Image (cartoon, helix red, strand yellow):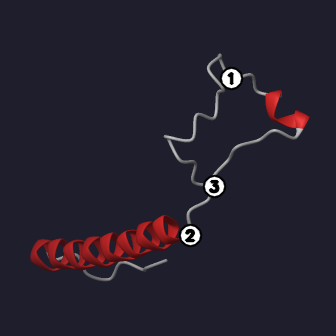
């Protein structure tokens, strides 16, 4: 879950691990930010796959089984 850093989740005091069981949780989920992050992750995966393929081709790695 993505939490908004400006949401003041601690309430001004140190956060306790079990403090959110009182029903006053202020967790924020931003679907637009999540979609943007997922698009960036997909782009990074694509670029890393291309880079790994280029390195493997230049290095002459052959007959290695993939995942």
Q: Name the residue under label 3.
A: 1
Image position of 43 with respect to 21: above or below: below
Q: Which SS class for mark 1? A: loop
Which residue appears at 65% of the width and 16% of the height?
A: 13
**Residue 42 position within the rendered picture, expressed as x and y whole percent measured from the top left:** 39, 76
60 or 2, which is in the foreground? 2
The residue furthest top is 13
Q: How crowded is mark 3: few (under 14 residues within 10 Å), some or many (20 or more)?
A: few
Q: Earlier in the sequence, mark 1 or mark 3?
A: 3
The disc, 2 or 1, on the residue closer to the chain's N-terminal end is 1
Determine the CA span between mark 2 and mark 1. 25 Å
Q: Name the element at disc 2.
A: helix
Residue at x-position 32% and y-position 76%:
43
Q: Mark 2 points at which residue?
A: 31
Residue linked to disc 1: 15
* Vertical position of residue 2 compared to residue 19: above or below: below
């Amino acid at each position: 879950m993505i939490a908004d850093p400006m949401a003041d989740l601690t309430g001004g005091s140190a956060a306790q691990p079990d403090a959110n069981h009182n029903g006053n949780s202020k967790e924020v989920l931003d679907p637009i930010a999540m979609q943007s992050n997922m698009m960036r992750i997909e782009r990074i995966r694509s670029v890393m796959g291309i880079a790994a393929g280029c390195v493997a081709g230049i290095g002459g790695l052959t007959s290695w089984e993939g995942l």
